Image (cartoon, rainbow, N blue to C red):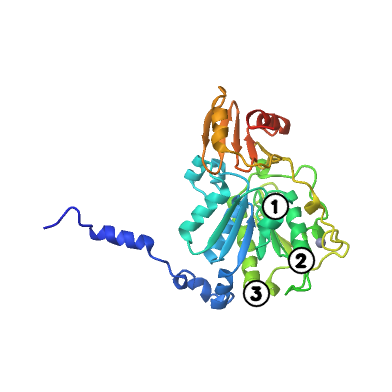
Amino acid sequence: MPSDESPGPSVTSNTSSATEQISDIERYSRQVLFPGIGAAGQQRLAEAHVAVIGCGAMGAASSSLLARAGVGTITIIDRDFVEASNLQRQVLFDEDDARQSLPKAEAARRHIARFNSGIRVHSQIADLVPANIAELLAPANILLDATDNFETRYLINDYAVREAKPWIYAAAIGAYAATMNILPGSSAAEYTPTACLACIFPKPPSGNVETCDTAGILSTAVNLAASVQVTEALKYLTGQPHLMRRTLLSFELWNPATGARLEQAEISAATPRPDCEVCGQRIFTHLAGKNRAHITLCGRDSVQIHEHHRPVDFAAMRTRLAAHADIQDLRSNDLLLRFRRGPHTLTLFPDGRAIVQGTTDVMLARSLYARFIGS
Ligand SMILES: [Zn+2]
């Protein structure tokens, strides 16, 4: 007699398929067939560690490509959380992440675990600064730039040149994408050094720099730069740095103002500039700099408050904030505490860092922080 308690065959088979190991042989079979990778290259990827700095559109695309390719360990560093306006281009995130305001590094780690549980992902919810750069980046074989600002890129360049660690610049704005491999020299390096970022651009761009806030951004431009960036990283990680591009490569995919259809440009970055302050004279001003205090965040109408490095007790903070009559939507989890006060939303991270949304006025953001979180 059939019994209600006996498990049906479909239940049993679902349970087993949910826990069945996916074999690496099957997973990477098409990539191993490619002669540039092969079985030996795939093994090298499994042993590699890549750091992705920033997990906006570029970082989400690059991390996803690295993870699917089987890079064994990925460190993802990001200071921000997921918002609805990210979903147009940040391919690792979904609507639930935006509703929960999940930190991007952690959301990325969770999504990657769903399509490749065989690799390790370290999520670092932090702003990359001189004080933490060595700890965060030292274990990585190569560094991928997915930041949205030149200040961090010059910091990465200083560190990478000092430590002779390769890094790959990548940027996108509007329908424009650019990328460059930086292979710093050292006696142990298995390659001829290239120019560094400061060889090509001695100073960060000044004046009105366009951001995704002012120029908008096409998802396709970001993904193009990420694809080139990760391909170059795969060459390095599989022991083929001699096949890496030695140029600053840029694409204009679509420009209604100039009528550009698809323009590509390359300028040589093949050799270091002998009088370069960073790789020539080894003066690392960005590494020596103090932590950045406050910055406005690209496209966000937000200010980051950064100077208060001390752990925060979320439970105690919740109790204290609940006493304020003008505070609304107070909520917290292990990763962040958030509340709204008038037109401003404050998001606090466990290390004391905060993002104040609804203003680009640093003084106002500081005063809100001091009043509600502490000085
Ligand atoms: Zn240089």
- Residue pushed farthest left? 1
Which mark is in front, 2 or 1? 1
Q: Where on the picture, by quarter, is residue 275?
A: bottom right
Q: Are the two marked residues, 2 and 1, in contact with CB atoms closer than 8 angstroms?
A: no
- How far is the residue under mark 2 from the one under mark 3? 16 Å
Amino acid type indicated by mark 1: Asn
Amino acid type indicated by mark 2: Pro
Q: Residue at x 82, y 56 (%)?
A: 284
x and y, in percent, of residue 170 in the image? 68, 57
Residue that mark 1 sits on = 132
Local SS, label 3: loop
Residue that mark 3 sits on = 239
Which mark is in front, 1 or 3? 1
Q: Nearer the viewer, residue 85 or 160?
A: 160
- Queried on whether the Cβ of the residue with tag 1 lies below 8 angstroms from ligand 1, the answer reads no
Residue that mark 2 sits on = 184
Q: Residue at x 33, y 62 (%)?
A: 16
x and y, in percent, of residue 167 in the image? 70, 62
